[in-house]
Amino acid sequence: MHKMKSYLLVMVLIISIFANAITGQADPFATVQEKLDGITVEEKKVLEQFFIIIQEIDVMESEEERIAQEIAEINDDIKTLENEISLQEEEYKAKQNGLEQVLKSYQRMGPVSYIGIILESDSLSSLIRRINILRDLARNTGELLDKVEESKNKLMDNKDKLKYNIQLLEDRQRELDEALEKANTLKVDLEELISSLGEEKEYYRDYLTSMQIAWDEAKTMFSKIAENFSKIVNESNISPEELNLSFSANGIKSVIKEDTINDIISKEADLEEMVIDFQSEKIRIELPKWNLNLSGKFIIDGEHTLIFQAEEGSFYDMKLENGSIEELFKDRQMVLDLLPYLGNNATIKSVKIGEDFMELIIGWSLF
């Protein structure tokens, strides 16, 4: 019964999406904004509850995809290991058989025969040659023993790896089953909540369909926005005056104004009117076209790079769950590589965000 309800909900959403596409919906963000403009406070609270569930479903479905991909990769590794083990077993048996034949030959000769071989030499050169032959025979036997042992160790290592991968596969399969169960439960919960609204259920379902379309579009486009943001340093010319360089007790200090960054961003057509707002110990990134806002901080990655780490976010003033924020940055991080301005001899030691500015402390080396 639950599965049937989940199926019906998904089908309704899919039909709604296609219906919107057929009727010429070109801008899902404008549609959502138009709908939200006339919504009451109480209605928005209900919609926010539903949107949280939608986000959780999205996260679970992404988790399903991730785990399924891991399972596929582990299965490939298992097949590769099984083929290697099969070849190594054949090689191991062949070397064992070769060693067995050599040892049988030694056994037939007996220990006295070594002395006999040497004493039967009829000249000094014959004696030396026979001694060398015996030495080579002993050395080759030793090498063969080593190779047999090496093959055995490789075989055992790969069998251990195979056992580990099989266990890993079983663990991931359990995780996948749990993710599927949770996603299906959430879908059923969502459908039951909508159904409980009685006559208003179609009203809210329409809102949710529009929100889902807009959110999916935002996730798809955000990766491109993050990529373009990461290019702004290389494609801009910041003057020394704009870097505001000075000496401090900890190194060279650079204070970059919020306006400087926003001026650079405003010249990039692909950044969709992005606005950076430096606040006390926090960075706020606004994307008005999508009604998407994120806040967080820059963390230092390596010697010259800053990465934006989002901590909070909202979409049409509705809170984004942590999993949804992670989804936004799944394919691309927002990166500022300051190497073109700092040079190879400089290292970012610290970054501080204040009202309307970003302060960097830079270490400098002459060598």
Image (spheres, rainbow, N blue to C red):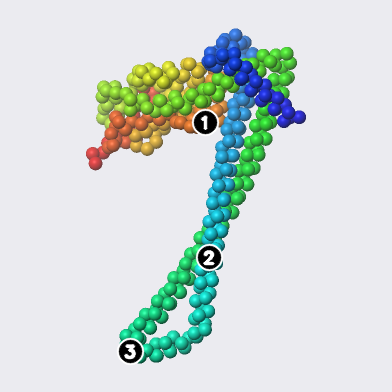
Cα separation, mark 3 vs mark 2, equals 41 Å
Q: Earlier in the sequence, mark 1 or mark 2?
A: 2
Quadrant in which the C terminus appears: top left
Task: State which quadrant residue 12 falls in.
Answer: top right
Residue 332: percent from left, percent from top: 46, 31
Task: State which quadrant residue 69 falls in.
Answer: top right
Task: State which quadrant residue 82 falls in.
Answer: bottom right
* Contact (Cβ within 8 Å) of mark 3 with mark 2: no
Q: Which residue is mark 3?
A: 123
Q: Earlier in the sequence, mark 1 or mark 3?
A: 3
Label 2: element kind? helix
Please name the amino acid that badge 1 sits on.
Glu
Quadrant in which the N terminus appears: top right
Residue 107: percent from left, percent from top: 52, 82
Q: Nearer the viewer, mark 1 or mark 2?
A: 2
Placement of 156 over or under 205, stated as above or below: below
